[in-house]
Amino acid sequence: MPRHKKGWTLSTLTILSLLLGICYIGGGLAKLGGVGVMRADAERFKIPYSKYRLIGVAEVAGGIGLAAGPWLSLLGVAAAAGLALLMAGAVLTHVRAQDPPGRAVPAGIFGLSVLTIGLLHVVS
């Protein structure tokens, strides 16, 4: 278990980093694998699927970095920052597509969660 500079374990931060990292990896793999709902989203957002898959690459990379963050703090902070920006873009994309607010809420929650984890890495 990673330890803080002062010696206490970062168990909560570690667990949250791993869980969110797994979520992002799963979402990214779904985009890369061409799952039907992801293809439908790309079409609704008017994004060519070949470019939409690049979002999946960013999610997988960010998820790996986030999961590694408790052991490689700088990587965790960088991954969290990148994923927070990605989720801000997702919220804007839902708004631009005139989706109901509930469709953008998950991206907003994930964005705020990953931003919080990044800030916790910085202060710990």
Image: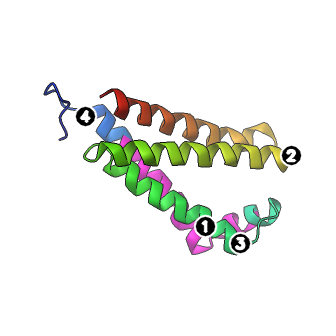
Please report contact status of discs 3 and 1: CB closer than 8 Å, yes or no. Answer: no
Left/right placement of residue 58 relative to residue 11 reads: right
**Amino acid bearing label 1:** Leu
Give the structural element (helix, strand or loop) at label 3. helix
**Amino acid bearing label 2:** Gln
Q: Which residue is mark 1?
A: 54
Q: Is 16 a magenta residue?
A: no
Q: Which residue is mark 3?
A: 49
**Amino acid bearing label 4:** Ser
Q: Earlier in the sequence, mark 3 or mark 4?
A: 4
Q: Earlier in the sequence, mark 4 or mark 1?
A: 4
Give the structural element (helix, strand or loop) at label 1. helix
Above-or-below relation of 43 to 5: below
Q: Quadrant of the C terminus?
A: top left
C-alpha distance separating marks 4 and 2? 40 Å
Q: Is 19 a magenta residue?
A: yes
Please tell me which residue lies in front, 44 or 60. 60
Dominant secondary structure, magenta: helix
Q: Which residue is mark 4?
A: 11
Characterize the local packing of mark 2: few (<14), some (14-19) or many (20 or more) Cα atoms within 10 angstroms.
Answer: few
Q: How many marks?
A: 4
Give the structural element (helix, strand or loop) at label 4. helix
C-alpha distance separating marks 3 and 1? 9 Å
Query: In the image, what residue occupies the spot 60% across and 67% down?
Result: 54
Q: Earlier in the sequence, mark 2 or mark 3?
A: 3
Region rendered in magenta: 17-40
Above-or-below relation of 42 to 2: below
Residue 98's label in the rendered image is 2
C-alpha distance separating marks 2 and 1? 23 Å
Point out residue 99 in the picture as x, y percentages from the top left corner: 82, 46
